[in-house]
Amino acid sequence: MKFNGVEETLFIPLAARVLISKNYPNYFLDTKSLELENLEQVKSINKKTNEYLTFASVARYYVFDKIINNFINKNKDVNIVSLGVGLETMNYRIKDNNNKFYSIDFDKVIDLRLEILGKKENETLIKSDILDMKWTEKVDKNKATLFVVAGVFQYLKEEQILKLITNLKEKFKNSEMIFDATNSFGIKRAINYVKKTGNKNAMMYFYVNNEEKFANLANVELLEVYNFLKKLEKY
Ligand SMILES: C[S@@+](CC[C@H](N)C(=O)[O-])C[C@H]1O[C@@H](n2cnc3c(N)ncnc32)[C@H](O)[C@@H]1O
C-alpha cells in the first residue's frame, strides 16, 4: 500500500508505543501495539529515533488515556471519536464499558487499520477527511462526546483547525476535545523528528504559543493544559 507523507506518519507514534512498552512497561504498556513490533516500518523507525523523543511521544498517550478514562467515569455512556486515528490502539487500552469508539482517517489508512488491527465490536471505522463534516452524520449526537486528536493538528493550518472546532461545537452540544501541540520552537524540533524517521514529505504548520489566546480564537472554554515533558521529568 502506498501512502502520502501525512498518512505515512501513522507509523511514528505506533513505533514509539512499541519501543516504550518493551523497555518501560511500568510506565506505559500497550500490548496491542506490541503485537505489531515486527512490522517493517516500526523496526525501521525505531532504528532511527532516539529514546528521549520516543518517550516524549508516548507521554502524550499516558496523559490522554487518563483524560479519556476520567471523561468516561464522569459521563458513563459516551462517544470517543478519534480524528486521524492511524494505527492508534487506544480502544484496546481503554476499558470498554458502554463506550462507542469512532475511528476516522483517510481511505487507505482505514483499509490498513482493518487489515492489521481488525475492528472491535464497539468501534465504527469511518473513511473520511476529518475536515469534511459529512462524517459527523454517523455519530450519535445525544451522547457526551470526546474528540481525541493525537499527533494530527500539526499537519493542518490554524484556520482549518478553527473551522473544524466551530463545526464540531455546533453539532455536538455536549462535547470536549483533547489535542497535542507544541509551541513555535517545538514545531521546528517536531519537523526534524519526523524527518529523522525517514518521512521527508509530511509538512507541519500548527503550533500554540499561548493556550488562552488560542481558546479565545476558537471560542471555546479552556479546561486544562498539560505539559507532557514536565510530567516526564518527574518520572
Ligand atoms: C502522526 S499520525 C497519528 C495517528 C494516531 N492519531 C496516533 O496517535 O497513533 C497522523 C494521522 O492523521 C491522519 N490525518 C492527517 N490529516 C488528516 C485529515 N485531514 N483527515 C483525516 N486524517 C488525517 C493521517 O492519515 C495519520 O493517520
Image: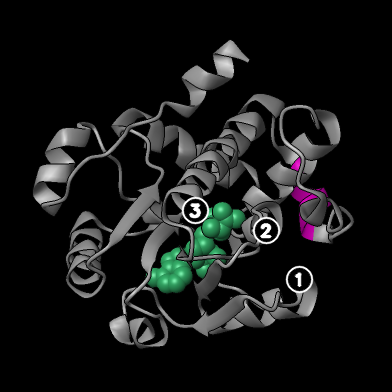
Q: What kind of residue is marked 1? A: Leu
Picture quadrant of residue 87: bottom right
**At x 66% / y 83%, what residue is drawn?**
111
Given residues 55 and 66, the one toward you in this image is 66
User: Quick check: 104 above or below 202?
Assistant: below
Tell me if mark 1 has few (under 14), some (14-19) or many (20+) residues whose alpha carbon lies within 10 angstroms of its own.
Answer: some
Rounded to the nearest angstrom, the CA distance separating label 1 from label 3 is 23 Å
Q: In this figure, which residue is indicated by the disc labeled 2?
A: 89
- Asked which secondary structure carries label 3, the reply is helix
Report the Cα–Cα distance between label 2 and label 1.
8 Å
Q: Tag 2's secondary structure?
A: loop
Circle 2/circle 1 CB separation < 8 Å: yes
| Whether the residue under disc 1 has CB within 8 Å of ligand 1 | no
Q: Which residues are magenta?
A: 41-46
Its colouring scheme is one colour
Q: Amino acid at mark 2?
A: Thr
Residue under circle 1? 117
Q: Work out how far the residue at label 3 is from the one at label 2, CA to CA, in angstroms.
A: 17 Å
| Residue 137 visible here | yes
Q: Is residue 138 above or below residue 67?
A: below
> In the image, is the residue at mark 2 within 8 Å of ligand 1 by its beta carbon?
yes
Q: Which residue is identified by label 3?
A: 72
Give the quadrant of residue 185: top left
Quick check: 64 left or right of 40? left
Label 3 crowd (10 A; few <14 / some 14-19 / many >=20): many
Residue at figure coordinates x 61%, y 75% from the top left: 123
